[in-house]
Image: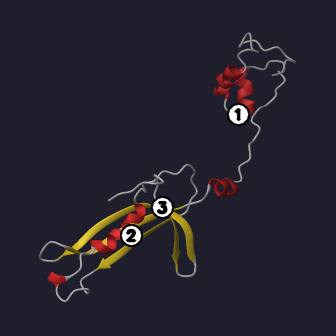
């Protein structure tokens, strides 16, 4: 089973782990052992989309003292490694990955977004060309078309710029 979730913003922590399940010690013999899916399905359910929210459930993952975060199960893979004579799986490995869950407010606070002002004002000098201005402003003379496209209404002749004029 695979379960993939989409996230709007990146920079979340991820955690991957492998869980081993063995039900062979539950019964008296290999024929009478418990179906391991009774254990693994409980864990795999954490990665299934819930009908009421249309999303995987949010969980708090705690391991020991130092590892704790809110997460969504991103992926669950189940592999059966041992079966009893009747074909019932009795050993399995679940490989799981978790993505940290943060509210939009928490994500924006962490990102510390600031809008830069990318507009520039330039006064045309003697012998200026759009290619020269592009080189001086952007470090690439071939970006002259970006300047021309952004100032199409103000530029009547792309080859002749009037000194002293600004845009």
In the image shown, does 8 or 36 lie closer to the viewer? 36
Residue 117 - label: none
Secondary structure beneath dot 3 equals loop
User: Residue at label 1?
Assistant: 138
- Image quadrant in which you'd find residue 137: top right
The residue sitting at 78% across, 15% down in the picture is: 161
Q: Residue furthest left?
A: 85
In the depicted structure, whether residue 137 falls above or below residue 131: below
Is 39 positioned to the left or the right of 60 in the image?
left
Mark closer to the observer (3, 1): 3
Measured as percent of width and height from the top left, residue 88 is found at 18, 73
Cα separation between marks 1 and 2: 54 Å
In the image shown, does 59 or 139 lie closer to the viewer? 59
The residue sitting at 32% across, 59% down in the picture is: 1
Residue 57 - label: 3
Disc 3 and disc 1 in contact, CB within 8 angstroms: no
How packed mark 1 is, by other alpha carbons closer than 10 Å (few <14, some 14-19, many 20 or more), is: few
- Image quadrant in which you'd find residue 128: top right
Measured as percent of width and height from the top left, residue 24 is found at 24, 83
Q: Residue furthest bottom?
A: 28
Measured as percent of width and height from the top left, residue 14 is found at 51, 63
Quadrant holding the C terminus: top right
In the depicted structure, whether residue 73 falls above or below residue 30: above
Secondary structure beneath dot 1 equals helix
Q: Residue furthest top?
A: 156
Measured as percent of width and height from the top left, residue 31 is found at 14, 82
Disc 2 and disc 3 in contact, CB within 8 angstroms: no
The residue sitting at 74% across, 10% down in the picture is: 156
Secondary structure beneath dot 2 equals helix
User: Residue at label 2?
Assistant: 43
In the image shown, does 110 or 46 lie closer to the viewer? 46
């Amino acid at each position: 089973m695979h379960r993939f979730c989409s996230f709007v913003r990146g920079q979340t922590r991820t955690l991957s782990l492998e869980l081993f399940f063995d039900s062979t010690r539950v019964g008296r013999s290999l024929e009478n052992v418990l179906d391991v899916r009774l254990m693994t399905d409980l864990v795999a359910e954490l990665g299934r989309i819930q009908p009421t929210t249309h999303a995987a459930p949010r969980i708090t993952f705690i391991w020991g003292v130092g590892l704790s975060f809110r997460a969504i199960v991103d992926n669950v893979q189940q592999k059966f490694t041992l079966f009893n004579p009747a074909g019932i799986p009795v050993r399995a490995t679940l490989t799981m990955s978790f993505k940290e869950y943060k509210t939009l407010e928490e994500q924006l606070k962490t990102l510390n977004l600031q809008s830069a002002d990318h507009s520039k004002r330039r006064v045309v000098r003697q012998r200026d060309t759009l290619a020269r201005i592009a080189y001086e402003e952007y470090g690439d003379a071939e970006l002259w078309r970006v300047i021309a496209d952004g100032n199409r209404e103000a530029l009547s002749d792309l080859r002749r710029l009037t000194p002293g004029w600004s845009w």
